[in-house]
Amino acid sequence: MAATLPSLTSSGSLLSGSQILLECLKREGVEVIFGYPGGVTLPFYDALYDAPLKHVLVRHEQNAAFAAQGYTRATGKIGVCCATSGPGAMNLVTGLVDAMMDSIPVVALTGQVSSKLIGTDAFQEADTFGITRSATKHNFMVKHVSELPKIIHEAFYLAITGRPGPVLVDIPKDVFQGSAHYSPVDEIHLPGYRVYTEGHTGQIRRAAQMIWESERPMVYAGGGVIHSGAHHELRELVELADLPAVNTLMGLGALPGNHRNFISMPGMHGSYAANLGMYNTDLLIAIGVRFDDRVTGRLAAFAPHAKVIHIDIDPSEISKNRNADLPIVGDAKKVLTKLTKVMRELEPEMRGLKSAQRAEWWDTIRGWMDEHPLKPVFSMDEIKPQHLMAEIDRISGGEAIVCTDVGQHQMWAAQLIRYNHPRLWINSGGLGSMGFGLPSALGAQYACPDKLVFAIVGDGGFQMSIPEFATIANQQLPVKIIVMNNGYLGMVRQWQELFYNNRLSQVTLDTFPDAHMLAGAYGFPGKTIDKPEELRPALEECVKYSGPYMLNVRVTPFENVYPMVPAGGAINEMVLEQPKPVEVA
Amino acid sequence: MLQTLSLLVENKPGALMRVVGVLSARNYNVESLTVARTLDETLSRMTIVVDVDHKVRAQVVKQLNKLVNVLQAQDLTEERAVAREMILLRIRAEMANRTAILKEAEIFQARVVDSSIEGFAIECTGDPEKLDEFVDLMRSYGEIEVTRSGLVAVSLDPKKLRLASPIPVGAAAEEEEEERILAN
């Protein structure tokens, strides 16, 4: 794969490695680095001292990677994080694997001990290159300062092209300190890197025919649509043939949450209608999805009556889990543009072909949606977690950025808050990292200073990310931190209740800091509420406040997420509500 | 089942680690692996034999092709290809057996590369089954020690003889390449 970079003014001057790195970052349009300095990155941080590039000092390197992801997920631009060698680099790893699982383009810069010390078990030495091999789409170690420009531009190019992903560049201290005549690299040459974006014309034509001919079609759109920026094209396709559509956890917002063709999210905690739709469809139009086990349930029982059209930029996703009857390898935006064009060409003769069956299919789906809608639960005495999400939805109106951790609150936020645009819903989907919500909200708010950004976190994950209170306060980022506090590691407890005879092992979180005092210690307001009537005014106060605000919401402790497809179950066999306790005489 | 793969890989630090890493991360068992430079010094050729379920064979190739340092990964299992392995075998031979051992070696077109009072060192090349037979036969004569090279293979498909890097250019080439990927 070869590409041309925008040309640059300066050339041929003698610069230090650190300065060359800064030049390269400038050329890539980097405006901010989320990072933490250390011994071997001293030369770089010295150069940064009078560079125009902004740096956000996080309080833990893992959060640098999460914040960079928040920045990327909110904007589509490559987020950059930076850490020193050894422990710094090791702390980045969770954030990198997280980005890998969700295909998020992030570039990580790590310091390494001087070349001559590598392999001597030097102070703060770790085999970052080896350890991050499987945590990244690709990684580099810079051997000489002269290689630096080439490698940095290759890293940015690899991160964002094809199926996006994190790329790490490990830079020894002597490379930062060394000097070279800097001449900008104008071409990227990666002979082993091939990206197929166009989509096969014949396959696209066949897909168009299959869509018109199907009786019970279902669009299954995921994160790939958002990465590709194909949300307009998706909407056009869905409207053209009046297709029902589900968005995966990673794809929420690909089709607006209030769109009439949007069914909801499928999968383990997906809606009744979405899962039955997936089960009963005769044509599954899969776009930028990977048939994850949390979506499909037991594979053999997933969409058993359906032919599958699978559009994906990564050939290795085709027929990985579910065999694709019609694969199209390409970029979702390009493929969908062509697909709708061909569908319009075929429209005069094919529209109306199956109109009776299509109408019946829609009636069936609407029936399912009415039968068991995803709707909040309310109580007069306690704040139900679903009530909390419904109130946030009311304030957001489908327009706010919502970042979450992983667990029950994440599922309720996915089910009950609408996302009318892509890049509003930011969560750790594939890896499911606790402690993701707050730092990613930090990155998202930094990228979008004028947007309303919620960090909705559980009381478990929240306590993994408290250090970033300092960063949020220091940067004056008006993140609205909403703790859905049920006093438990709720999702683990839910599984213990359901599958481990209610033996609640190590899931009680009975010590929680006082929100007012905790936030107050960092200089911003915090408040705890536990009565349903307090919820609306407290949220309004929180949103109205000009800076960061922590709202600790004590919710019903024993509330579980439904519908639920038990692990390994078929998606049409959902548990729709909490099993009633057995009366003991 | 055993799957034979041929890879053209950039001769860069970490390239071998990436290939092996993908195989182990995806739970594919490596039976043998050989690697050496090609005529083009910037490239290496690897022959890898993996033990995988029939269903994931295509997936193995796709995962390897996804690596940035891999220019081309192909499955030679059912292709027209020649596969060979070499063994170096030491055998402790008593005087009475020595002539017989040499005769057997001759039948297998093996070559004696060292001879001493204790016995012989013998080099033998062939397909793995033939080498298995040779090893079994030698064992019947006395104590042996064997080092196997692992399989090396070359495709005999005339279209696959490529001296330059196989980089498709333009939309047409992209479609052709996609067809090839999907056919896997």
Image (tube, coloured by chain):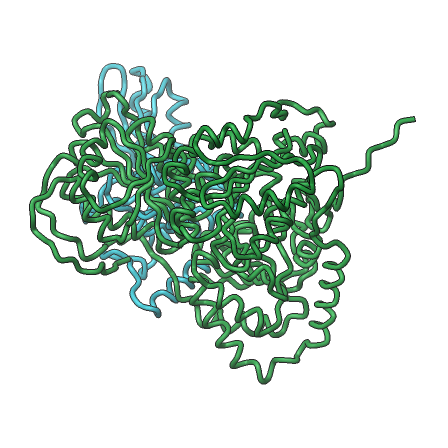
Residue A435 screen position, x and y as percent? 49, 35
**Left or right of B1, for residue B124:** left
Residue drawn 23% across the image and 32% down it: A41
The foreground one among B95 and B1 is B1
Residue furthest bottom as drawn: A348
Compared to A569, does A1 lie above or below? below
In the rendered image, residue A155, in percent from the top left (x then y), is placed at: 28, 47
Q: Is residue B20 visible?
A: no
Nearer to us in this view, A298 or A481: A481
Along the line of sight, the residue nearer the viewer: A281 or A404: A404
Residue B153 against residue A194 in the figure, above or below: above
Q: Nearer the viewer, residue A504 or A402?
A: A402
Figure quadrant of the N terminus of chain A: bottom left
Q: Quadrant of residue A306?
A: bottom right
A372 vs B105, left or right, is right
Q: Quadrant of residue A314?
A: bottom left
Which residue ends up furthest to the right in the rendered image?
A: A585
Instruction: Give the quarter of the figure containing the C terminus of chain A.
Output: top right
Chain shown green: that is: A
**Chain identifier, colour cyan:** B
Q: Is residue A440 visible?
A: yes
Residue at 29 percent across and 16 percent down: it is B95
Q: Position of residue A192 (x, y in %)?
A: 30, 52
Residue located 69% across and 72% down the image: A358
Residue A104 in the image, given as x and y percentages of width and height: 41, 48
* Image height of A289 relative to A309, above or below: above
Number of numbered callouts drawn: 0
Residue A362 falls in image quadrant: bottom right
